[in-house]
Amino acid sequence: MKAVVIYKAGGAENLIVEDRLIPDDIAKDEVLIKIKAFGLNRSELMTRKGYSPNVLFPRILGIECVGEVVEDPSGEYLKGQKIAAFMGGMGRDFDGSYAEYAKLPKSIIFPFESVLDWSVLGALPEMFQTVYGSLFLALKIQKGESILVRGGTSSIGTLAIQLAKLEGLTVIATTRNPDKKESLLKHGADFVVIETGKIEDKIKAIFPKGVNKTLELVGTSTIKDSLLSTAPFGTVCMTGMLSEQWSIADFAPMEYIPATVNLTIYDSGQIRVEQEHFQNFILQIEKGEIEVVIKETFRLEEIVQAHELMEKNSGTGKIVVLP
Ligand SMILES: NC(=O)c1ccc[n+]([C@@H]2O[C@H](COP(=O)([O-])OP(=O)(O)OC[C@H]3O[C@@H](n4cnc5c(N)ncnc54)[C@H](OP(=O)(O)O)[C@@H]3O)[C@@H](O)[C@H]2O)c1
């Protein structure tokens, strides 16, 4: 099979396409999957750059995929069953999805039914988990509330805007690039604010007390400003770190967090959303209630170009690879 292997941290050119044997030692608690599509994730970019000290090289990267079961020694899944897989050490502790086949633990797979193209399905597993978990489990969004989506043009942000809107919230979304304003409005944002790192005043010009909920995707470089932009009793959920900063120097909670404003996080590696929600989400896409934005699709052999595109931050939407 073809697989993308990384031997040393660095630029996209360090992703090497090579021939590997298809795994044939499938244990009872594992399945062999033929990978039909996988989305690219910024955590893979971080690992590629060497910012994931726990990931040992050489490694086949890839923290998510969709595909079909080829072999399940336990007999639970039939050959051809469609499955999604994500996280749980995939592409980090053991070889991941940047390949034509993968041997995966059954604990990280979700079976599903769908008539959607693989190119759309490939964008979904990690994106859905993260957005659903952030909005409904961490932020506990409610109809009638306001929400600030910071990093709105990211694929996570664009889906969060749509799900929050469907739930009946008023949405403010940010981008650093004024050219992307129309795209945010088209996906349901009621207001667009240009990201400058300090937007509290602009948020309070719209909602004088601040917003009820904030989804922080930019990271710790903006989180203090997000806390200040959020109303008393509101909640900020840090889910992303697009600015590649994830720690706060000299964190003094009493000075940092405004009284009664809640600060939480969502991490799809810690809490998995149940399978039925994923299947319902797929049905919503099939009915046209949600638009999945795909930036571009690539073949496995084009993985270097795909990673280079991810680093450019142009356009909106998920990058999907079809092995
Ligand atoms: N917690 C979890 O479980 C979890 C799971 C998955 C992903 N994530 C995180 O969620 C975030 C979004 O992921 P994604 O895959 O949706 O990203 P993405 O689609 O690759 O996001 C691209 C957009 O991010 C914005 N951006 C890039 N660098 C930025 C910076 N320094 N400051 C502000 N905005 C910046 C750019 O928007 P503009 O140019 O329009 O400003 C760019 O268009 C990432 O940090 C990712 O690691 C977390």
Image (cartoon, rainbow, N blue to C red):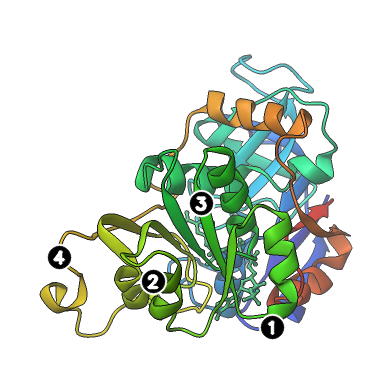
Q: Ligand 1 near label 3 (Cβ, under 8 Å)?
A: no
Q: Is residue 84 above or below residue 48?
A: above
Label 4 – label 3 distance at C-alpha: 24 Å
Residue plotted at (69% across, 70% down):
181
Q: Ligand 1 near label 1 (Cβ, under 8 Å)?
A: no
Crowding around mark 4 (Cα neighbors within 10 Å: few <14, some 14 to 19, many 20+) is few
Mark closest to the chain's N terminus, 3 or 1: 1
Asked whether the beta carbons under mark 4 and mark 1 sit within 8 Å of each other, the answer is no
- Residue 73: x and y in percent read 63, 21
**Numbered mark located on residue 149 in the image:** none
Residue plotted at (43% across, 73% down):
205
The residue that disc 2 covers is 204
Q: Secondary structure at mark 3?
A: strand
Q: Amino acid at mark 1?
A: Gly
Q: Amino acid at mark 3?
A: Thr
Label 2 – label 3 distance at C-alpha: 14 Å
Q: Secondary structure at mark 1?
A: loop
Asked whether the beta carbons under mark 2 and mark 3 sit within 8 Å of each other, the answer is no
* 2 vs 1, front mark: 2
Mark closest to the chain's N terminus, 2 or 4: 2
**Numbered mark located on residue 11 in the image:** 1
Q: Amino acid at mark 2?
A: Lys
Crowding around mark 2 (Cα neighbors within 10 Å: few <14, some 14 to 19, many 20+) is some
Label 2 – label 4 distance at C-alpha: 17 Å
Frontmost residue, 161 versus 62: 161
Q: Secondary structure at mark 2?
A: helix
**Numbered mark located on residue 259 in the image:** 4
Label 2 – label 1 distance at C-alpha: 41 Å
* 3 vs 1, front mark: 3
